Amino acid sequence: MITRHFAISVTSPGTILRRERDLGTPLGLEADEISKQGGLVPDDIIVRLIEDWLNLHGQDGFVFDGFPRTVRQAERLNELLEKKGKTLDLAIWLDVSEKTVRDRIAGRLQCRRCGFTTSLTSACFAERSICPYCDGPLIRREDDDASVLQTRLAEFKSKTEPLLSFYEESDALHRIDGNRDREAVFADISALIEERK
Ligand SMILES: [Zn+2]
């Protein structure tokens, strides 16, 4: 939605890694094995991939979805941006309850090609399992099994939650209630981006 509305390039480590996996690169296969078991891919691999992406796409702004996910990644991102003479305008923290997480994962579909995510209950996509943006196949993600969820939540608590205090020290951090529907959340995020244009 951000890409379409503001023409800002968006990526996530997941999108980059899935492409590497589909290409069958050693890095892609190694990372795939780790995330299948619910673990986090090592920081150094993620940061290297993000840096490559930024060199190709980051000229007119960028959005990272699910990155940084550890304090180490955030520190490396700061170094990277400093090197490029760029600053971080916004760090958006989407607050969601564990119930919301469970409900959404239960019905999540994702485009294997571009990473677009939707849900089984989204009426306009229910009749066909094809991505509206790239015509790629929409599939259930393999790491969406309930057995893997506990590991992911524990990883989140120990490794990702400390990012709140990391970014609270800068003016970039904004917390948004992510338990609402996609339009309400996007309206809040849009307002923040508009303020900084
Ligand atoms: Zn797609």
Image (spheres, rainbow, N blue to C red):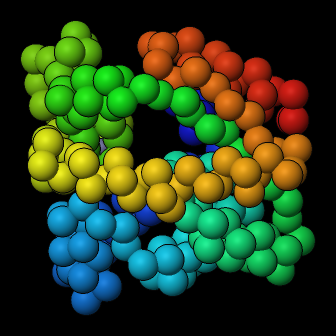
Q: Position of residue 26 (x, y in %)?
A: 25, 89
151 to 173, vertically: above or below: below
The number of numbered badges drawn on the structure is 0
User: For the C terminus, which image quadrant?
Assistant: top right
Residue in view at x 35 percent, y 23 percent: 100
Front-most of 24 and 79? 79
Question: Residue visible at 56% across and 50% down?
Answer: 161
- Viewer-side residue, 114 vs 65: 65
Q: Quadrant of residue 23?
A: bottom left
**Residue 18 at x, y = what percent?**
29, 64
Residue under the image location 25 percent in, 15 percent down? 122
- In front of the other: 93 or 47: 93
Residue 67 at x, y percent in the picture: 55, 58
Is the residue 73 above or below the residue 140 in the image?
A: below
Residue 131 sits in quarter = top left
Q: Residue at x 64, y 16 (%)?
A: 187
Position of residue 130 relative to residue 158, above or below, is above
Tell me if 148 is positioned left or right of 78 in this view.
left
Rendering coords of residue 89 (x, y %): 82, 47
**In this view of the protein, can residue 11 be seen by the observer?**
no
Vertical comparison of 174 with 159: above or below: above
| Quadrant containing ligand 1 | top left
Whether residue 105 is visible here, answered yes or no, is: yes
